[in-house]
Image: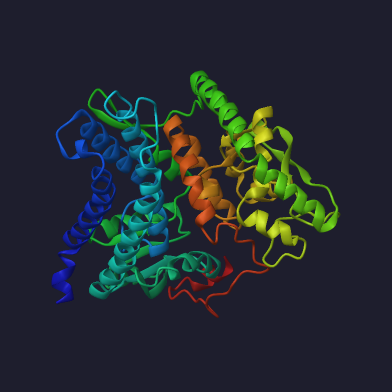
Amino acid sequence: MKTKLRKLENSIVFLLKLTMHMSLFWTFYGLYSIKNWQLLNISRTSGVVLATYFIMSYMFANIYGRYDIGKRKSKPIMHSLILTFVFTDILSMLMLSVMNTNERNNKTFELEQPGLLLVIFLIQFVIILIFVYGGNKLYFAIFDPEDCIIITSSQRSLNEVIRGIRKYKLQYKICKIADYRDDKLKEYINEHDTVFIYDVPIRERTSIVEYCYQNMKNVFFNPDMHDVIETNAKHIILDDVSMLGNYTKGLTLEQKFIKRVSDVIISTIALVVTSPILLVASIAIKLEDGGSIIFKQNRATRGGKIFSVYKLRTMKEDVENYSVIENDERVTKVGKFLRKYRIDEIPQFINVLKGDMSVVGPRPEMLANIFNYTSVLPEFEYRLRVKAGITGYAQIAGKYNTSPKDKLILDLMYIEEYSLWLDIKLLFQTALVILKKDSTEAFKKEEEFIFEEYVPVSQTETTAQEQ
């Protein structure tokens, strides 16, 4: 029975998605049409409001994520949908208020029933809650987790990748772990639905990916430097020869100008809006231990230029300076709260106004970290091709303890894909960071050891263990 239902997976998800979106739409449109009768007729007001609602819902769904049950956990989907429809409802209500500013309705601009909007938020929250948690429960009741094989090269690499996969136990069931040099690798791949490839040399990885594609297997692999270049390359045709071209000229003069103007505007607004929060935080820091409020530290930005980054102090004074670890005794009680909600980073908008940083860009690392990371990953210095930023791919998708290589890939993806729209998208996505419980997860004192022993089953197991 479940095998037959698997063929209807897309249809089931589509019906749930359609029902949820129609319920959310009618909650907003139907309740507002009680007083605004013109919304139920063919009119300019109904046309403009409908267009605003559907365009905004589509745009914010692209920013925050869609109703992808079975692929993501329920809580992240909830956060995505709530933010999408909060912004959609607010902007649609504002457009309705604009359309109602006329001789027949409101002679001056007035917000259209703001109290009703709060009721709509509450009803939509319940609808999203039911469809997300209920939808995922139904999905996993019908569909079993995919049988997975992990192909890697060492115990350390296995430990790194398995943490992420094990957080999705309902989606993926780890049935086999294999070394990429195993002679029976193709046989193992044929026995499973999904293949995870991690830390495998490019030549061998390419061969494995091609075999998975040939045999209709789902495949996931961690990107490398050349993958970033290839992903952002453009298809060009020279006469009748297909080529992929990558242009590494950096930001154009126009892009730099627009980015700088937007940085100044956003930073000025942010500092004004958050000034009450900064005042309360400053008082709290001073009351706890009487120490300094602002913490300064040398960081590197574009071209390796050194600057002093400003942050609200979250640690005790006169302590050794290194990356925060789990249950770090150096962090103050007030500091824990400030770090959890990223309030400590607000003063960095001053750095943006000074021109040291941008609102969006790679996170400015400590100088010691840059030296250590670059000694292992020489490509890490490529992050310095643009100004450091307060928010960005690595800050949104990653955590404090994200590995240097994963940070590098995320930052390089941003640099290669840069556009004004991408900056806007990442600015809105920053709201998700506050909702993510583990976004400020610190470095652990020592690596977790997932398995007691990982012994490659190939004939070259000695080589694998030496790595």
Left or right of 234 on screen, residue 345: right
Residue drawn at (22%, 26%), measured in percent from left and top? 240
> How does the figure colour the protein chain or chains?
rainbow
Residue 392 appears in the rendering: yes
Q: Is residue 190 visible?
A: no
Residue 388 vs 354, above or below: the answer is below
**Residue drawn at the location 35% of the way across and 39% of the way down:** 93
Q: Position of residue 292 (x, y in %)?
A: 83, 47
* Residue projecting furthest to the bottom: 452
Q: Residue at x 48, y 64 (%)?
A: 161
* Residue at horizontal 67 percent and vertical 54 percent from the top: 338
Q: How many marks?
A: 0
- Residue 295 in the image: state x and y as whole percent: 77, 45
Compared with residue 83, is residue 199 higher up or lower down, i.e. above or below?
A: below
Location of residue 216 in the rendering, given as x and y in whole percent from the top left corner: 23, 60
Q: Along the line of sight, which residue is nearer the eye, 421 or 106?
A: 106
Q: Residue 379 is drawn in which quadrant?
A: top right
Choose between 464 and 300: the one closer to the eye: 300
In what quadrant of the picture does the C terminus appear? bottom right
Quadrant assignment for the N terminus = bottom left
- 244 or 411: nearer the viewer: 411
Residue 294 at x, y = what percent? Answer: 77, 44
